[in-house]
Amino acid sequence: MITVQQVEQKLFDWAPRQMAESWDNVGQLVGDPGREVHRVLVSLDITEPVVQEAVEGGFDLIVSHHPVMNCTWHPVQTLRTDDRQGRILTKMAENRISAICMHTNLDAADGGVNDVLAEKLGLTQLSPLTEEKIGRIGTLKCEIPLVEFTRFVIESLGCNGLRYTDCGKPVHRVAVGGGACGSMLPQVRAMGCDTFLTADLKHDLYLEAREAGMNLLDAGHYSTEAVVCPVIAQWVREAFPDLWVEVAENQGEVFEYF
């Protein structure tokens, strides 16, 4: 018998709890640790469509990157079905679906979000961007024009599109940060990178990058992190060959470009 707790521990072997940021909420967040697991659904977010997919597919466990509840983002003070988070948690409880969430610990882990993102973009000679091992720095095998790199990013990550500022330099030494890593721009600049790719960037960061002579790309939160979902699924399959593991189909970027 394979339990939720056993799956959680195996995931912590890969991305230890102590690697998570102090504000983060990781590990098993919903369900009975001793519940037997047969079918696992992997997703970036635990949304209503993902939970419905789990219900219809008979899944016992959802493993996601983003926490289904995090008091920093959305204080859980009630459990009501007229609230989006309340509906999600209620439906999971009613259908005995557990949740394990691996967030900033998986951002930092070897082979986690940022390594997968960097490798997906063809970067080699990788090193951590920060002391906490968030973000990666790497190099392309040769310099390429920014317009060529942007096309490659869209194709590789399946972006709807991206926002960027062009400082006039070719792309060679690149920093990446899956999700919202704009605050790391000073570290990227100090490491001598010509290009930084992340998500959820604000206006002032584009101004700062332009003044620093750095290409800055926002490829979207979903696209820069969802690359890890197939890797999570494969990790669980290899650790527990008897489990049926799938990546959720009912997920994707939450906005479109007109």
Image (cartoon, grey):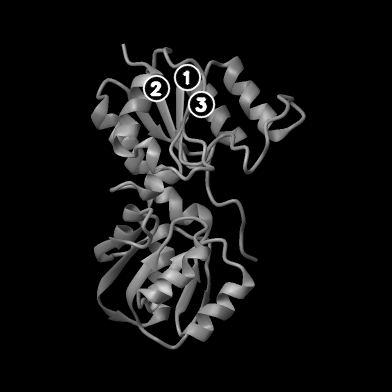
What is the three-letter code of the residue carrying label 3?
Ala
Residue highlighted by disc 1: 58
Percent position of residue 126, x then y? 26, 62
Residue highlighted by disc 2: 39
Left-right relation of 238 to 114: left
Left-right relation of 24 to 72: left
State the separation of the CA atoms marked 2 and 3.
Answer: 9 Å
Q: Residue at x 39, y 75 (%)?
A: 190
Residue highlighted by disc 3: 54
Q: Residue at x 48, y 70 (%)?
A: 185
Q: Residues within 10 Å of mark 1 (few under 14, many from 20)?
A: some
Identify the element where label 2 is drawn: strand
State the separation of the CA atoms marked 3 and 1.
Answer: 6 Å
Left-right relation of 187 to 237: right
- The relative height of residue 84 versus residue 149 in the rendered view (above or below) is above
Quadrant of residue 200 in the image? bottom right
Sequence-first tag of 1 and 2: 2
Are the residues flagged by discs 2 and 3 in contact, CB closer than 8 Å?
no
Q: Residue at x 35, y 25 (%)?
A: 7
Are the residues flagged by discs 1 and 2 in contact, CB closer than 8 Å?
yes
What is the three-letter code of the residue carrying label 2?
Arg
Q: Residue at x 41, y 71 (%)?
A: 188
